[in-house]
Image (tube, coloured by chain):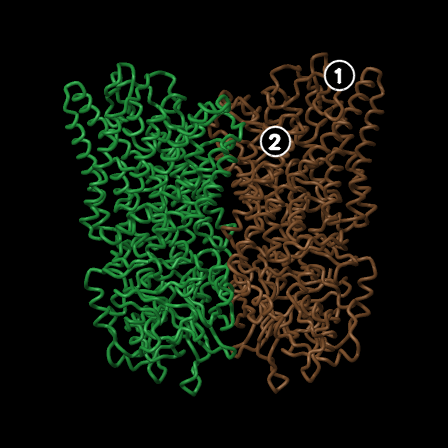
Chain colours: A brown, B green
Amino acid sequence: MANITKKVSWSSRGDEPAPAGEGTPLLNGAGGAARSYSRQFSGSGIFQIGRLSTVDLEEDPAPEEESAISRPKEIPHNEKLLSLKYESLDYDNSENQLFLEEERRMSYMGFRCLEISRWVVCALIGILTGLIACFIDIVVENLAGLKYKVIKENIEKFTEAGGLSISLILWAFLNSVIVMMGAIIVAFFEPIAAGSGIPQIKCYLNGVKIPRVVRLKTLVVKVCGVICSVAGGLAVGKEGPMIHSGAVVAAGVSQGRSTSLKKDFKIFEYFRRDTEKRDFVSAGAAAGVSAAFGAPVGGVLFSLEEGASFWNQMLTWRIFFASMISTFTLNFFLSIYHNKTGELSNPGLINFGRFDSDVSSPAFLHLQGMCGLLGALFNVLNYWLTIFRIRYIHRPCLQVMEAMLVAAVTATVSFAMIYFSDDCQPLGEDQAENYPLQVSISSCPVVPFRSYVCPTLQLFCADGEYNSMATAFFNTPERSVRSLFHNPPGSYNPPTLGVFTLTYFFLACWTYGLTVSAGVFIPSLLIGAAWGRLFGIMLAHITPYGSIWADPGKYALIGAAAQLGGIVRMTLSLTVILVEATGNVTYGFPIMLVLMTAKIVGDYFVEGLYDIHIKLQSVPFLHWEAPATSHALTAREVMSSPVTCFNRVEKVGTIVDVLSNTSTNHNGFPVVTRVMDDDEPGKICGLILRSQLIVLLKHKVFVERTRSRLNQRKLQLKDFRDAYPRFPPIQSIHVSQDERECMMDLTEFMNPTPYTVTQETSLPRVFKLFRALGLRHLVVVDSENRVVGLVTRKDLARYHLGKHGLEELQLAQT
Amino acid sequence: MANITKKVSWSSRGDEPAPAGEGTPLLNGAGGAARSYSRQFSGSGIFQIGRLSTVDLEEDPAPEEESAISRPKEIPHNEKLLSLKYESLDYDNSENQLFLEEERRMSYMGFRCLEISRWVVCALIGILTGLIACFIDIVVENLAGLKYKVIKENIEKFTEAGGLSISLILWAFLNSVIVMMGAIIVAFFEPIAAGSGIPQIKCYLNGVKIPRVVRLKTLVVKVCGVICSVAGGLAVGKEGPMIHSGAVVAAGVSQGRSTSLKKDFKIFEYFRRDTEKRDFVSAGAAAGVSAAFGAPVGGVLFSLEEGASFWNQMLTWRIFFASMISTFTLNFFLSIYHNKTGELSNPGLINFGRFDSDVSSPAFLHLQGMCGLLGALFNVLNYWLTIFRIRYIHRPCLQVMEAMLVAAVTATVSFAMIYFSDDCQPLGEDQAENYPLQVSISSCPVVPFRSYVCPTLQLFCADGEYNSMATAFFNTPERSVRSLFHNPPGSYNPPTLGVFTLTYFFLACWTYGLTVSAGVFIPSLLIGAAWGRLFGIMLAHITPYGSIWADPGKYALIGAAAQLGGIVRMTLSLTVILVEATGNVTYGFPIMLVLMTAKIVGDYFVEGLYDIHIKLQSVPFLHWEAPATSHALTAREVMSSPVTCFNRVEKVGTIVDVLSNTSTNHNGFPVVTRVMDDDEPGKICGLILRSQLIVLLKHKVFVERTRSRLNQRKLQLKDFRDAYPRFPPIQSIHVSQDERECMMDLTEFMNPTPYTVTQETSLPRVFKLFRALGLRHLVVVDSENRVVGLVTRKDLARYHLGKHGLEELQLAQT
């Protein structure tokens, strides 16, 4: 359990309100008398907070806090931490008086119009996501085509003349430069755009607010970044980032404005809250999957499997609708681009080609032994690598340099493999029909911007032959996958495949986690397809099954599914995605079996890749259920206490002071009716959020002690919506000394009916309530309805099942 | 809004506890002062109860109640009623001390074992469901084959000799007799087995306890019934009942015992509660769909779309697993039966055959205008018919006679259509490859039990030709669907198809709702396929699209999807089911579009068929969300009050009296700590169920006033599990006068942490909590935590959006 100094790559920047815990009282709180789990505070930490029980709320820890903010964040990090910097999203509507009044005013027709506008938003999401996918595809295709054309001409020039090292240098240089551009924009402008974005979207849908994850800037960086990394020849795919892109599109479109561009279209104002936004983000993620794989049903299932808690039929249909529109848009525009208008043959970014024949033998069962093992190995290696990166590679320049290094190494390795390979295959018309490889080098037409039809390389092979290793390496991964699936038996030698699998495995593993926008789907498929095909060839040699499973392409498909399943550990959605991408339901059953086995085998060793990365970021992610053995814990042990509460009519000064207290930084405050005796906790009568209080302070909704209202304009729900989601920090709001003496009446703005539980409620029960309703704060009350504690996401996410039973993570201000 | 006298076909029989409302105080309760909705009491009712505000709780309505029970139930019925006879299921665990102690004792390994046994149960469910599907298929095939063989020989005999009326009579007679058998067992032994069972399973998963819906007897009757109805030539399918069968299997297997057979295997005791059982029933329903259509993913989606509320990933995987096992089992055994072991070519009961070619034209868009309209028409007609049946055909003998009549009419109509048809088609080898119709009459091999390969009829056609109308009628619907999909262009004349569509439409509409076990999927597909094919032929004649869409079989597929979607209104699951049954993902997109349109168009006119039937049974079904315009209502208006509460230590006599009160028949009782002043409601400290009290009374867990325990044995959770789910009625428990004076300590057995809301909580918020957590009782408290009301399923289901805004259904003791 070594402590690791960590660069926080998802950290807040200056434009965000300071990181805050959901009302978790940091420097105070007894934390329950019956706490029986030991808390180990790792020694080296700055400002590390468990729940110290003696520090007074009034003590001002600001100097230390400020120094922690100003210096480069190198904080202690280990797996057993839970970061306090992530806020939660409010997936439970704050049903205050303003909201209820608006809802009550709205007629039935009003709700119908809302419903229609939801469908319109989903259609827009689908169209825009499809267009983005289209754009990425076309740009990548042309850029990569141009690059390979230049390199190929160079290689051809030097093959006979000698001096291929110049070609190698050219290749490595081109790759590095392209990747550098991608890495620079990611590392310096928007670190959140790194990686596939799927873990971040998972967190968002789970209810964790990852700063800047759904901003326009993120989208731009993501799109440019993914173009650079794919065109730069890294072992990455462009499919994962599509999911993130779709989510950003959804978050933007549904709000009817862009805060970054300072443009408000004054539409869809009703949707400006977390609950509605989440629904659209689900739709966007689904549209992304749908565009990436041409799998609308798979997209819906992805959204549900990764994000949903409460399945709502209407919502599901809308998500489905967005997915369909998205795949249709992509298909339509790519068809136009390819001059095949009306054919609609490009439902997704990746097209596995058509698998036509029957799977009539359960021979694929042989593969299952390997299922998951390789995936688990990938995950373990990547886990170590990520820890290494967190520890040592946390400066943007270092990150860019690493990306460039990987790009150069990828080019070098590819070149070496091609160079030393002696796997020459005849060029011929018997290559897969679905794959436009037939054109030999000499006959390659030089069409500008369509130069990507000639990936075969002759190199040292005889005339009329091509280097088969080059087909695997000298290519974007998507095309390599297809050629592994569909090239006829004999297109690849077993040694070629073996070496390719090995090198590509390590390359892909090294690449995932770089500071570039890139997905892991396609590399996984490629690795799996390579060893699957290898396996198929071997089997055909050894066993009498050869005749039935003569086509190693099918083994490649099954292998690809196994590898991908072993890495990402999705089952239902992945089955559907693969089946939709394959276009043949016959493969559904073997794919299901293989994915299920991969999941079971893999889970035995290590978690899925996305979960590993979520854990390494110390995100307070809520899983589906509370740990099985957690019935012994009750709300009393879990909750944070004491809680900072407000009175129904509270002094402005008090509110400002509490909000300004950077050490607590609570986000939700129970509102209580104080009884005479001040020591007693008050009876709960509502719950108010930091963001609401900030809007109230900003609009100076004060009453004098005489109850005459100072500010005459009645605050509207619109004021809250206009401020959403970037509420100003408390520091930006000036409150004069006179105003501090005024009172603020919270009655109208607080949620008068927060969900409450009693102290005896067991952890699984609290968890279920919290997770099913998407709560952010859950008030714990005693039998008299007096507030005794507050349960937030972090309080629940802290408990998890480790190897030795129930373990408790520490909270840390990372 | 006419009042209809109704035979209650899902009613309780003698072996059930008396119908009871979930603590809804029937004859008392002010029901909220601010109630602003008019209540219309239909005049003719016996014992009709709204919430009269003046009747005293002590008044004994027993005499009238008894007379209502003893006489044949002819109660007023209209659409605006909600029946009180349906109890709810407890999908929220009662976390009492016993339960928590057990959970806390259990080690991590214990939970692992439980998890493994859940997977084992799912495997068993899959296997058994697959075997049942296999059994039904084989028996139906042989029985129908035998019947058609007899009739065909008879027709052949009389075609030349004259006197075909004898054949007609024979046909009608055979049909009627077979159907009669099916109708008799359903009408007299198990009325709940009527219909497809899908509405009942929907209700079960929704949380409504439909009496006897998951019993062994129901399964037996269902299986025999469906065999009779399909073999009897009715316009029905055997797919819907498979879903019900799967659910029953799941409910049985997961409990590790059969109450009917009085056999307890002493396994899976942990699963003997509603929460766990529901999860398995979902898996069973999915396995049923999977076996019926060969669609494992579709099965999972069906379960989720129709039943789920909280999506749990582990649960979904288990459901998926059960589905896969089920389709594999069916496939395996049918392959053996068909002597093609190892080919696994029968993934489902219905096989659409393989659609190979591309859908490269969006010509199907033409169809969308009709989508949903015909489905809506079907639903409207069936709705009127069902009301007619409820009003007039409520005696079992009448029901059997109606079924026989329909069978005879079906035979007659079919015969007439064949007789008057002059659509002769040449027998030839160009018939669909997937459909074994090639054998001409003369060459038909007489293989016992495999006689079903010769459905062509020559009749008055020339030698070498066959009557194409006969192909459509002289056949089980499954085979007709396939022939419509796959027979080459020109196999059917447009007039044949037109007449067939018309007659079959009305026949199917008349048939659904008969007292036989039968599904509506296949007839819908058949109607749709017929008009789709007709449409395709017409279009090919009229437009230049003819060349592209030359194959009317594709139009048939799209038409079938449209018709089925228009009737049942599922989208996501139906898309996947149809795609999986078709075996070709290319058709996914058109099918999606068509289903979506059918849903939107259809919903404009009338609800889906299943929802109509659920509504007509006055089931308190909770939809996905509260009505949009219901924010004006709060828990105060919705709740029932006053509530019958118990003290923590209560007098046995009081408990027995309350439980015996047939007029209230509450099922859940808040437990309160009574304050001194008796008028004040007490503070909530728990919730106890009728069933738990009954077990306590049965085991006489009494303490004397001196607090010495009378019964020394400590009650275990096992005692509750043994009694589950058929808790004895209170009448069967004898409590002596002495015992009545004893006290009962409820502390250990009550749920100490029931969910509560305050009176100001809005209806949508209450609804969300209730629905997301699968609650049965929700206690409404005031600011002092004193019980002021109780919200149950019926209180929430009463509000729905009608044509004139929010409407309120009446509660009635139907």
Along the line of sight, which residue is nearer the eye, B52 or A424?
A: B52
In this picture, is A280 found above or below A704? above
Indicate the amino acid at tag 2. Answer: Asn
Mark 1 or mark 2: which comes first in sequence? 2
Q: Position of residue B629 (x, y in %)?
A: 50, 61
| SS of the residue under disc 1 | loop
In this picture, is A502 found above or below A187? above
Q: Position of residue B395 (x, y in %)?
A: 20, 52
**Pointer 1 indicates a residue of which chain?**
A
Residue A329 in sight from this viewpoint:
yes
Indicate the amino acid at tag 1. Answer: Phe
Residues flagged by tags 1 and 2 on a common chain: yes
Along the line of sight, which residue is nearer the eye, A575 or A336?
A: A336
Image quarter in which the N terminus of chain B is found: bottom left
Q: Which residue is mark 1?
A: A460
The residue located at (43%, 84%) in the rendering is B680
Please tell me in which quadrant of the rendered image residue B328 appears: top left
Along the line of sight, which residue is nearer the eye, B757 or B629?
A: B629
Q: Which residue is mark 2?
A: A346
Q: How many marks?
A: 2
Q: Is residue B208 left or right of residue A321?
A: left
